[in-house]
Amino acid sequence: MALMPLVIAGGMAKGYLEDVAEKKAKLAQIEAIKTEWLLNTGLAKIEKRREQRKAAQARISTATRLGFDEKAAIALEASGELSSVITRVEKLIEDPEKDVSTSSIKKMSQAILDNVPQDRLAKAVEYALDLGAAEEMTAEKLINTIFSTSDESEKFAAVADISTGTDMPSIKPTGINLIGLTDLSPEKTQKVRNLIEDRLKDSLGRTLTKDGYVWDNPGAANTIIEKALTYYIEQRADPFLDKDLADITTDISDKVQYLIGEGIPLNTIADQYEFSLKPTEFDYTPTTSPTQQTTPIAPPSSIIDENYQE
């Protein structure tokens, strides 16, 4: 009878040990599942980041192949614009009616470099050239972190901190305008000139006669129109043009109307005014002799709609 308590106690101890062993096994299983999840998640994020970097490098290489300066391409990548710029430039190149020159792309590249913060550009270039890669989490670093610490918060933090992007410092979108990459054909240039003439006909004094259109002051009128056309072409080529092309002709018309409204003679406007200048800032010397031109203007071959778009 005295042995019974010992037998019972021995059975209880055995049951306890088995229960502890089972719990340890379950904990080990849970720990293994956590570790596997952390590894898989972390490695997947690292791989996605690698793919993003690879894609970014491919876009930068494509842009340089198209003629962009490498740093300008990196700036566009950092601003999130490079992909769309490449697509649009390639479409322009493929269009037989468009003439995209390497020199115009080079000029646009320089304009981009001149208009982005240099400190942000330097950081973007550094990351694009993989100079900052050593600071990032790699597969080897991740494995070492997970298996070298028992602190779960540290393990989860290591995975959570892994970026899935390129880690390239961002740059504010440039709003680059690609229309300046193409040259105006002679036909389109004439259409623009006709449009400018039509917008300025009342201000400059144009009359339709049986012999064609005649200006009250043909010399001044033609000089002003030529200057306006030059201004239009310069504005069109501006990579950061923030208005529609139709707005340029409106701008030209408004400036001429303002100057005439101020009582400034056409000869003075023709000889001294440049359309890049605000009319309110025009400081002039009155012209004493008229600009001469004896050849009347021939009528345009067709009426050009004021809302002409390329």
Image (spheres, helix red, strand yellow):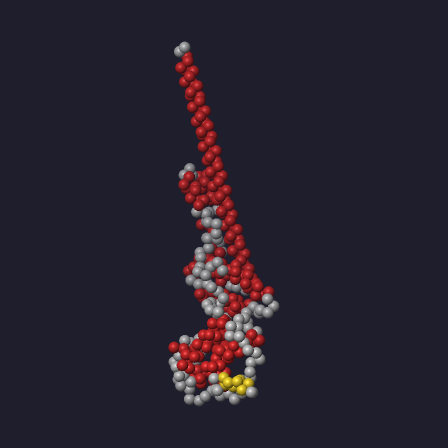
Residue 125 visible to the viewer = no
When asked about the image quadrant of residue 212, the answer is bottom right
Residue 77 or 253: which is nearer the viewer? 253
90 above or below 221?
above
Image coordinates for residue 19, horizontal then vertical, percent:
44, 26
Q: Residue at position x 51%, y 87% from top?
A: 293
Quarter of the picture containing the N terminus is top left
Q: Residue furthest top?
A: 1
Q: Residue at position x 48%, y 75% from top?
A: 249
Residue 40 or 138: which is nearer the viewer? 40
When asked about the image quadrant of residue 155, the answer is top left
Q: Residue at position x 52%, y 60% from top?
A: 84
Q: Residue at position x 49%, y 78% from top?
A: 199
Image coordinates for residue 201, horizontal then vertical, percent:
49, 81
When asked about the image quadrant of residue 64, the answer is bottom right
Image coordinates for residue 2, horizontal then vertical, percent:
40, 11
Image coordinates for residue 48, horizontal then vertical, percent:
51, 49
